[in-house]
Amino acid sequence: MTDIAITAANVLAGSDSTREQGRAGVAITAGQVVYKASDGTYKLADTNDSVAAARKPAGIALNGASAGQPLAVLTKGSITIGG
């Protein structure tokens, strides 16, 4: 199996994309898969997490953000992942 290395600086939403604006609940890098937490922030999705919401991705982060900073999330449409 080959892993894809995401180049955060090259993550770009397509013209057909749908986006949401929110706040990061943890440090997030562009290209990472995120979910919307119960406190309304976006955190890193994880299929092995004990929290059910964390196993349901909301989209892909379009920019990097530290906890509390603004975050754009692609929820639908095409994306260039830069990998």
Image (cartoon, rainbow, N blue to C red):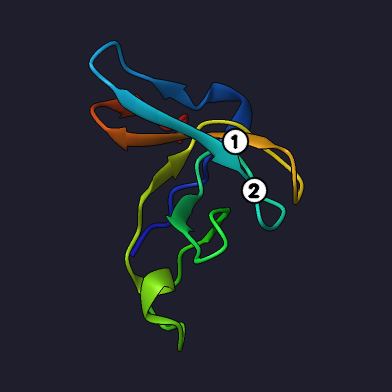
Residue visible at 69% across and 58% down? Answer: 26
Residue visible at 44% across and 48% down? Answer: 4
Callout 1 secondary element: strand
- Location of residue 76 (image quadrant): top left
Badge 2: few (under 14), some or many (20 or more) residues near its Cα, within 10 Å?
many
Q: Is residue 7 found left or right of 76 in the rendered image?
A: right
Q: Is residue 61 found left or right of 70 in the rendered image?
A: left
Residue visible at 38% across and 34% down? Answer: 74
Q: Do the numbered discs 2 and 1 sit on residues whose CB atoms are within 8 Å? A: yes
Q: Is residue 6 found left or right of 9 in the rendered image?
A: left
Count of all numbered marks drawn on residues in the image: 2
Q: Position of residue 44 (x, y in %)?
A: 54, 61
Where does label 2 land, which residue?
Answer: 24
Residue in front for this viewpoint, 52 or 49:
52
Where does label 1 land, which residue?
Answer: 71
Residue in front for this viewpoint, 32 or 83:
32
Q: Position of residue 67 (x, y in %)?
A: 75, 51
The quadrant of the image that shows the N terminus is bottom left
The amino acid type found where label 1 is placed reads: Leu
Q: Earlier in the sequence, mark 2 or mark 1?
A: 2
Residue visible at 70% across and 40% down? Answer: 65
Q: Position of residue 14 (x, y in %)?
A: 32, 17
- Location of residue 30 (image quadrant): top right
Badge 1: few (under 14), some or many (20 or more) residues near its Cα, within 10 Å?
many
Q: Please, is residue 51 above or below residue 71 in the view?
A: below
The quadrant of the image that shows the C terminus is top left
Q: Which mark is residue 63?
A: none
The amino acid type found where label 2 is placed reads: Ala
**Label 2 vs label 1: CA separation?**
6 Å
Callout 2 secondary element: loop
